[in-house]
Amino acid sequence: MTADRVGDGSQATGTAYSDSSEVYTTVWHDSKSGTNFYVVRQTSNAKITKTEFTLRVNSTVLGNNVVVPSSGVMALNGRESKVIVTDYSFGSSKLIFSTAEVLTWQTFDGIDYIYLYTNPTDSVEIVVQTSSVSGGNSTQSGFTITNKQKYTVISGSANRSSSIAAISIGKAVVLIADKAVALASWAPRVTSGKGVNYYTPSPQVAGVIITGPYFVRTASLKGSTLTLQGDINTDTTIDIWGPSSIKTVTWNGKTVSVSRNSQLKSLRGKLQYNLGGNKVKIPDISKGRWKCIDNTPEISASFDDSTWVVANKTTTARPQQPYEGKYVLYGSEYGFHAGDLIWRGHFDGNATGVNLSIQTGFSGAMSVFINSKFLGSAQGSSEGWSGVDILNGNYTFTPDLLRKKGNVITVYHDNTGLASDYNVNDEFKASSQIS
């Protein structure tokens, strides 16, 4: 087990937190809020079967090195990971511990709502501390509530009949959803302004909690009307948790009939999917007028490169000197330090060929043309710490390829980057070059 201070929290890792050697735990402690975050995952990602375990956690209420859950086990399904929290504040309430993960929370009309999610095949244990522990109740089957002196324990069986449940405890409501339901849940903000948008992470910004739609794009609340915009891909039941002032809901400009769902303590409505209502017209591409553009115009001898940088330096301060030739043809000498390069060489006369050496970096490539005609290409390689990073090409010109004047050789130089100085030998100063 190790412990380090990182930013404003501390980290500790190791297998000692769990009763299973197959579970690896990373612990983060937020010194400001006092919250502990236990990130649990399989020790080996090669294991894809289920692992059951208990966890030792610290809590200001439960104590230190407390084994949770108090009965039963938690589970990781294969490469799954989970974030388990202790002493997590939401509004004026506190989540002391939960085997279910936290999605979001909001406070509506003085009641703190926290949204938790888990696999439907997992049992759950949730410990909540709120301003009042009286009146704890569940209208959903599969859950039991035990009121303690300082907190309330919610226990849920595996394979519950309902995919989402709402449990009231004093001035808090705990929403417990299956993971699949949580994937279609949203927490857009209903206020906007400087530094705030529809999905500002902080739950301190006023918002609503929504489940059901494929995507909720925006939300705004004016008076008693909640205006939503989003997407659905089938007929959808929408549940909304928000302030009691909401009386009317619109979806993409149309009013949605909603009513209070007493079990979930939400506003519930139906969204009708209508593909035709999207007014999307599918074009007949067989009747379209198609156009194309040459993506390699530089190979043409008539291409205008008069505004290009002229590579005419004859010396360089770099320790690596050109392989051959009169000019220093280093990309970096002319301000091109990264990315692909295109070189164009002009000549007159009856040349018989060209011999090129191009430094591309490992797995780079080059393609060579003369007067729009393809001469050849080459590709480098990379394996471990070595490979081919200098490409050589010897190309012969046949008479039909040449013009009396204005011949142009075009080289596409696919550069994969500059070397670092791993061997401390100034290799990072070597530029992508052609000679």
Image (tube, grey):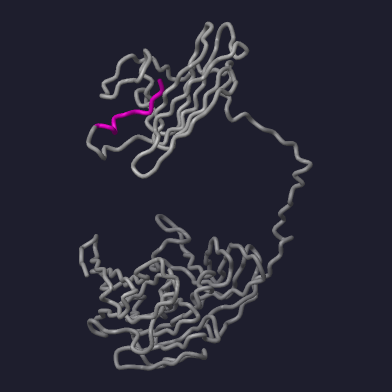
Depth check, front residue: 62 or 260 = 62
Q: Is residue 433 magenta?
A: yes
Which x, y percent locates residue 367? Answer: 52, 27
In the picture, the quarter occupied by the N terminus is bottom left
333 displayed left or right of 6: right
Residue at image location 30% in from the left, 21% down from the top: 321
Which x, y percent locates residue 180? Answer: 53, 73
Residue 25 found in image quarter: bottom left
Residue at image location 36% in from the left, 45% down from the top: 384
Which x, y percent locates residue 177? Answer: 49, 78
Residue 47 found in image quarter: bottom left
Residue at image location 35% in from the left, 72% down from the top: 40
> Height in image: 432 above or below 208?
above
374 displayed left or right of 123: right
Which x, y percent locates residue 258? Answer: 62, 77
200 displayed left or right of 402: left
Residue at image location 37% in from the left, 31% down from the top: 337
Magenta stretch: dominant secondary structure: loop
Depth check, front residue: 268 or 86 = 86
Residues shaded magenta: 426-435
> Height in image: 254 above or below 176?
above
Q: Is residue 255 visible?
A: yes
Number of disc labels = 0
Q: Is residue 93 visible?
A: no
302 displayed left or right of 118: right
Depth check, front residue: 245 or 216 = 216
Q: Is residue 338 magenta?
A: no
List the single residue furthest toward the right: 287
In the picture, the quarter occupied by the C terminus is top left
